[in-house]
Image (tube, grey):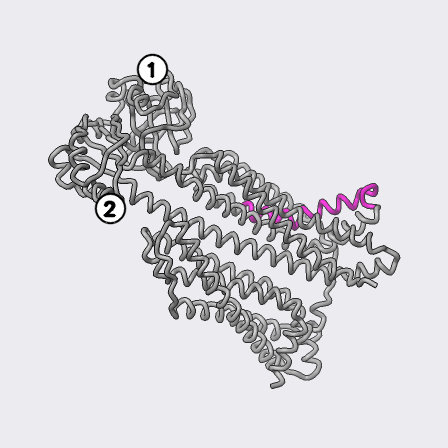
Amino acid sequence: MLYWKLALDSLRKNMAEYLPFLLVGSAAVALNFIIQLLLFSSGVQHLYASQAVLTLLGMAQVVIGILSLIFLFYTYSFLRKKKQAEFGLYSILGLKKSDLMKISFLQQTLTLALDLIAGLVTGFVMSKLSILLLIRLVEGTNFELGFSTAPLAITLFFFAGIFVLLFLYDCWTIIRTKTLNLLKAGKKGTTSPKNRWILFILGALMLGCAYYLALTVSSPIKAMQQFFIAVLLVIFATYFLFVAGSTLVLKIMKGRPSFYQKSKRFITVSNMLFRMKQNAVGLASITLLTTMTLVVTVTTSALFFGRQTLIDQTYPRDIQFTSMDSTIKTQNFDQLAKKYRVKIKDGYQFQTSQEFSFDITKNHELKAVEDTGQDGISQSIQLMTLSQFKKLGNQNVPNLKGNEIAFYSSYSSFKGKQLKLLDGHQYTVKKHLSGIKGIAVSPSGSSFIIVPDQKVLLNNLPKSATMHRENPILASYYFNLVGSKKDITKFSNAMQEGDNFEAQNHTRSISTSSYDDKRALNTFFGGFFFIGLLFSVSFILATALMIYYKQVTEGQADQKQFNILTKLGMSRKEIKACIRTQLVWLFGLPIAVAITHLSFAMLMITKVLRAFGVTNDNQVYLVIAGTILLMIAIYYLVYLLTSCVYYKKVTQLREN
């Protein structure tokens, strides 16, 4: 009974420190429970392309689970000093280390129970809204959530495991620490940090390398390969520069008497300098969390809002029929449409060469390859005559002479003025095209060479295409359908399954319907956007709680210093001005650095998005601008809320 009383008293007395920890735990339980409910939801499992959504949710569960573990340990570390001081006092009063472990076990049990109750109730309520949002985003129809014991059991076991680890953490601290050290744990002072030039130089070099990679990336393939390297460099560089660079800057300020020897600046700089040991890591963590929020929000939002452009590029028409025959008889399609009670409209035909894999060497020479390019990723190209290209509505190409071509690629980084083709002749690239109309562009990347005439086209096909295939020229017929959804589906299935259509009318043809693929793309990008929202909420919550804890702990530590300054005659107005200046620096620096990181990463982000078929850079830049403004607004709100906490902790002044 004594142990229960001591555990409850500790919880009650330290509620100011326990409350944020309980909020973190409850939020973590709620987020994990929501994902588990969605994973086992019949509404999600019956979605079209449900496997893609379930895979994304599974990935989200792993990331959110790891973040939950990290943030619970991080926020719990702020409680350790209070608990260590309490345990030191209990030891002096005669309690053994085994007794302290029992008290810790009861404290962890109470905290776990409160987190589970609050988190499970909140998670279940929010899961109703979550499935509504998810199903809307992926354009589903079944909004049934359901409830099973599996999500509950998984969540209970996961967080029970985390709190067992916290309990073992307490036991390890109690066993290895002497009683006197436990009692003095909350009273350890700080010293001025030393200059760390090696760390500063290393951080500057790593950041320079990361920015160089981001600014010089030449293609979507290289962007995807270099993205994680750049991310790792930025993470280490941010920590190194905040730890070493902030100290150097503050000491430079201190070394300038004209700047430093003013009351407001003197107090702000000296206080920040002596607290920079613990400030630096916290500020770097806040910066990285803010950067992660910006990057995740930008990429998932750009993919979601740019999906229609991708669909339009991939599917210019509802049905895309391609045949090995040089011509296509449209009356055959009219007969099939009549059979399934649909109408064909907006149809057009054109010709291209067959696709073949290619690579462009450093000497600007086109090479046909077996399957993949030097980067290990297949890049396909087709040749097309200028007359056929203009027939599709592409009037942005000037007339081409016999030795001139136009080049388009959504993937290749080639921007040269000369290109040697397969016939061994050097051609002048008269224009690099930024877009192409009327022909399907693959999300994984498509390239086209526009040549003057049919003779040049046939002379520049690889031998495999002409020797082993019946006809190197493909004929395509694109058209839209009008009719009921049911009849259109029947027509599309008949085209894809054959319906004796190919055997009777065409040799070796391919029919593609946009309906199923559009649904699949909407499901994927909608699910991806939903996961991005979950991650962003998690990162913002973690950032806010990290800032809150930072303000509480530093407010308590700075209280004595500002009380001394008050006794020396410093007015409340002057104290408030010093605090405001210090908070502006501590709040402004992370968001400014995060926006700088994002600004340098913009080119790389647009290249990575191109790999997913998002080619509208202007739309991406609008998403980036909107995300930055939203993040600044949220960050400012957190600043207003937490700065009041710091001010109250520091001054403890009351109105007379």
Quadrant (top left/top right/bottom left/bottom right) for the N terminus: bottom right
- Identify the amino acid type marked 1: Asn
Q: Looking at the picture, how far across and down is residue 21, in whole percent? A: 59, 65
- Residue denoted by label 2: 486
Q: What secondary structure is found at the residue carrying circle 2?
A: helix
Q: What secondary structure is found at the residue carrying circle 1?
A: loop
User: Residue 656 magenta-drawn?
Assistant: no
How many numbered dots are placed on residues in this image?
A: 2
- Residue denoted by label 1: 403
Q: Residue at x 16, y 41 (%)?
A: 498
Mark-to-mark CA distance, 1 and 2 = 51 Å
172 vs 68, nearest the viewer: 68
User: In this orientation, does residue 168 appear?
Assistant: no
| Main SS, magenta residues | helix
- Identify the amino acid type marked 2: Lys
Quadrant (top left/top right/bottom left/bottom right) for the C terminus: bottom right
